[in-house]
Image: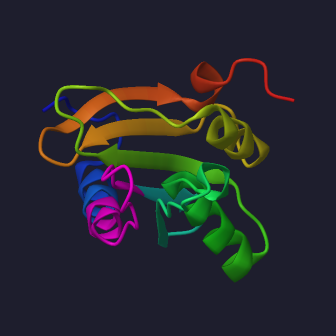
Amino acid sequence: MNKPSIDKTLFDKMFSAALNSQKNAYAPYSKFKVGASIKLINDETIYTGCNVENRSNGATICAERTALTDIIKRTGECKIETLLVMSTTDNQTIAPCGICRQMLSEFGPLDAKVFICDSHRGLIAETTLKDLIPFPF
């Protein structure tokens, strides 16, 4: 497994939280379960989300966005410090989709760390919001 550039205890806590959330994903159509965890600036809470599919594909919501909506519902504000997104990928690397990238950029800062993980293989890649969406709205 690659070594993350954040404190190992924090990374492990975020990994575990995303893994637990991934288990709750509702993915009866694709069978592709995704979990996400977010740590905010000046907040020790780890917020989580999972994907929720719908027969009408456009109504599906990604793990990153369920985590963001939970944060807004609970706190009324959101300044992302770190995002971890995970699935079980069979040697593929996943990353947030375009809609998630745009929504995440609303709650930057753009130098927020993003960890892309596989639930079996651990950390796959590390990047920033700015690298994911270099020209947000």
Task: Indicate the position of residue 56 as horizontal and vertical percent values.
Answer: 62, 56
- Do we see residue 41 in this rendering? no
Q: Is residue 7 above or below residue 131?
A: below
* Magenta run includes residue 40: no
Q: Which residues are magenta?
A: 17-35
Query: Could you say where residue 66 lies in the image, as x and y percent from the top left?
Result: 58, 64
The answer to which of 1 and 95 lies nearer the viewer is 95
Q: Is residue 49 left or right of residue 61?
A: left
Please indicate whether residue 118 sits to the left or right of residue 52 in the image: left
- The residue at the point 46 percent across, 26 percent down is 127
Q: Observer-nearest residue: 7 or 14?
A: 14
Image height check: is 93 above or below 68? above
Which image quadrant is residue 60 in? bottom right
Residue 20 included in the magenta stretch of the image: yes
Q: Quadrant of the C terminus?
A: top right
Residue nearest the observer in this picture, 45 or 98 = 98
